[in-house]
Amino acid sequence: MALLTIKSLTHYFGGLRAVANFDIEIDSGGIYGLIGPNGAGKTTVFNLITGIYRPMEGSIIFKGEDLVGKPPHYIAKKGIARTFQNLRLFSRLTVRENIEVVRFKRVKKTGDKEINIKTDYLLELLNLEKFANYNAGDLPYGAQRRLEIARALSIEPDLLLLDEPAAGMNPSEVDNLGQLIKIILEQFDITILLIEHHMRLVMQLCHQITVMNFGEVIARGTPEEIRSNKNVVEAYLGKGVIRLRGKRAGS
Ligand SMILES: Nc1ncnc2c1ncn2[C@@H]1O[C@H](COP(=O)(O)OP(=O)(O)OP(=O)(O)O)[C@@H](O)[C@H]1O
């Protein structure tokens, strides 16, 4: 059985069709990419999966249960965690507190000691140890992005949704993030769905990529298949923003 099967997912904002007949099937393990030009509907898909919006049509079957109509806290408890495109940290809490407050909400019965061990492990893994007692708002930007990932991991999800984790990072930070995502995949029994505009990162990490444009899936395949897909190149050329081969698409 697939970990997540989404069928015919459709959502409008007023008259704007943000997501239309979106389908995806995700098996356990590995990193799946979700890409597309700005405004394609990617973040809306995440918001539908995590219960922030209720889809107008379609089903979202996760571990055998339809999540449509379920509230965000239920979906998190069921095993889906996410990060946000615009960081949502508690800027006046420390790094450690940012992780513990989220984890504590999920694992209320766990004793303090276990929370600490787990938090220490996440701090080490995400290279945040030296910032443990800093306020989140005082961290360098790249570290804030890593803290978002640490927080999402702290609820021990089966599926991790990463929404543009490399946004605003410089090239060496992007490389480090790529390494980190690979390590996360090795260390946790987890599956990742990644929205990202950094094509090099997407092509390196993902074994299957789904491409959206104007709310619809326009292509699906391996990185190689996506690079040479005519619909994809045209979609990006229309927007003229994203580089598919390290150069402007088609140039
Ligand atoms: N809450 C909202 N109210 C109205 N329109 C919205 C809302 N959220 C998203 N939209 C619109 O829905 C469409 C899809 O937006 P979405 O944020 O899902 O795209 P995206 O692919 O994630 O884009 P980006 O790569 O720029 O983040 C866009 O036209 C956007 O303006």
Image (cartoon, rainbow, N blue to C red):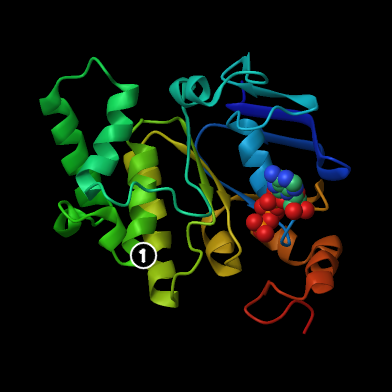
User: Compared with residue 165, is residue 48 higher up or lower down, i.e. above or below?
Assistant: above
Q: Given the current orientation, which residue lies at the most extreme bottom position?
A: 251
Could you tell me which residue is drawn at 28 percent across and 62 percent down? 139
Q: Amino acid at mark 1?
A: Gly
User: Compared with residue 22, is residue 174 higher up or lower down, i.e. above or below?
Assistant: below
Residue 41 appears anywhere in the view: no
- Locate residue 22, reporting x and y percent: 78, 38
Apparent side of residue 186 relative to residue 130 in the rendered image (left or right): right
Q: Given the current orientation, which residue lies at the most extreme left position?
A: 113
Quadrant housing the C terminus: bottom right
Could you tell me which residue is drawn at 85 percent across and 46 percent down? 16
User: Compared with residue 105, is residue 144 higher up or lower down, i.e. above or below?
Assistant: below
Could you tell me which residue is drawn at 52 percent across and 32 percent down? 28
In the image, 168 versus 21, the foreground residue is 168
- Locate residue 93, reporting x and y percent: 25, 46
Regarding mark 1 in the picture, which secondary structure is present there?
helix
- Locate residue 241, reporting x and y percent: 71, 74
Q: Using the rendered view, name the quadrant where residue 104 is placed.
A: top left
Could you tell me which residue is drawn at 61 percent across and 32 percent down? 52
Apparent side of residue 111 relative to residue 87 in the rendered image (left or right): left
Quadrant housing the N terminus: top right
Q: Which residue is labeled 1 in the image?
A: 142
Labels in figure, total: 1
Would you call the spot at circle 1 few (<14 residues within 10 Å), some (14-19), or many (20 or more)?
Answer: some
- Locate residue 118, reporting x and y percent: 20, 35
